[in-house]
Amino acid sequence: MQTHFSLAQLADPHVAEAEKILRTCVHCGFCTATCPTYVLLGDELDSPRGRIYLIKDMLENDRPATEQEVKHIDRCLSCLSCMTTCPSGVNYMHLVDQARVHIEKTYVRPPRDRLMRAMLARVLPYPDRFRLALMGAMVGKPFAPLLAKIPGLKPLAAMLRLSPGMPNGRAPHEAPGTFPAQGQRRARVALLRGCAQPVLRPEIDDAAIRLLTRLGVEVVRVAGEGCCGALVHHMGREEEAHAFARNNVDAWTREMDGPGLDAILVTTSGCGTPIKDYGHMLRLDPAYKDKAARVSAITRDISEFLFGLGLPKAPAPLGRKVAYHSACSLQHGQKVKGPPVELLRAVGFEVAEPFDPHLCCGSAGTYNMLQSEIADQLKAKKVGTLEALSPDIIAAGNIGCMAQIGSGTGVPVAHTVELLDWAMGGPAPAGFSGTAKAA
Ligand code: SF4
Ligand code: SF4
């Protein structure tokens, strides 16, 4: 794609990066076929190629974002399916990130939208605030259908509809500390606590810790770490996202330089993608760029790490069918597709994938609240293709997808590590009882 940035514009490293990305796009349009919003809405401006044109125009003319640009870029899920499809290697992730920062800096959203976004940014990244908000949501939930009819309050209605009821209290494993390996130690890892997951489903990290320690891995909850910054990053709130990233880089660097870490493990793939990108995110910060790159280099999704470690093979099939939903952040953001399926098969589950595995379920961080109508349609499609497999259970590696899909189906939904742990003697995930072997 030809670009026309001035030399003065290109002196800004952000613009120079955007120009480089834009120039790799050859307008072929292959990406449109795998873009969930284009498939659903059929509008070129809701396709990757259309958004790339909008971003180019906005950045090249160095002008405030328009209402139309904001509308179509807000509708992007950041699922990164387009990056998997693109034959030209366009880094859409870094381009849309820049567009979101530009929008945040130059566009004045309507007051209710601003309020909603500020509230999400102030609440979701902090587990204790999130717990309080969920308690409040229990009171407001019956009013969700009413609020959904008021223009501008749809995000609030969606938030109430998605709230799961009474939140979990603090789990013992949330506090800083060490879980020693059983037998000979094979590795020492930090396990990211995260922000929403411990509130919604602390059993995931219970399972991860049991599984890892049983396999000879020492697990550390590092003092001082917090939210990965993904939620605010996707809203274009760059300063806040960078502050979260720096905080975590500091916490993990202390641990790496002290007792040492072989890996930083993440059980929420939506957090893994930005942490693996910290090196890029902080590349212009001389005090942090090297430390951040070091952190990114040892960050792994839990399934990647377990796959490298190897699990004992099941002596016989378990007689349980799992429909595996591949989270976008895992398959497109981190290119981790095979390991979760192979691990589940290795421990004895029968695993099937839906016919549209590349398409997003509509969760996408705060998307299912801010763009609830599109998110609901994507959820209905995804639930339909997963249920068509007639599974006993649905598995995913991201709490956002689990909550989104779980709100649309009666089939139990579990995290991949909960199922692996169950097959290896751990307790049954929610919705099941007894052993992993079918009766
Ligand atoms: S990130 Fe997803 S929704 Fe956004 S343009 Fe790419 S494929 Fe479409
Ligand atoms: S597939 Fe890649 S090169 Fe082709 S239009 Fe989409 S982003 Fe551009």
Image: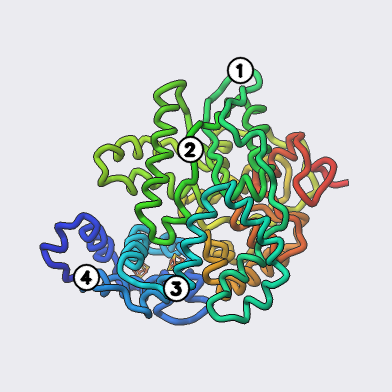
Q: CA distance from mark 2 to mark 1?
A: 28 Å
Name the amino acid type tagged 3.
Pro
Q: Residues within 10 Å of mark 2 (few under 14, many from 20)?
A: many
Name the amino acid type tagged 4.
Asp
Q: CA distance from mark 4 to mark 3?
A: 25 Å
**Location of residue 310 in the rendering, given as x and y in whole percent from the top left corner:** 60, 33
Q: Is residue 213 left or right of residue 364?
A: right
Q: Is residue 3 visible to us here?
A: yes
Q: Is residue 395 left or right of residue 8?
A: right
Which residue bears the numbered disc 1?
A: 184
Q: CA distance from mark 4 to mark 1?
A: 59 Å
What residue is rendered at 69% in x and 51% in y?
167
Mark 3–mark 1 contact, CB under 8 Å? no
What kind of element bears circle 1? loop
Question: What label does residue 111 carry, if any?
Answer: 3
Give the quadrant of residue 298: top left
Mark 4–mark 3 contact, CB under 8 Å? no
Total number of numbered discs in the rendering:
4
What kind of element bears circle 2? loop
Q: Which residue is more in the foreground, 224 or 357?
A: 224
What kind of element bears circle 4? loop
Question: What label does residue 228 carry, if any?
Answer: none
Q: Is residue 88 visible to us here?
A: no
With respect to residue 142, does 258 lie above or below? above
Q: CA distance from mark 3 to mark 1?
A: 58 Å
Which residue bears the numbered disc 4?
A: 62
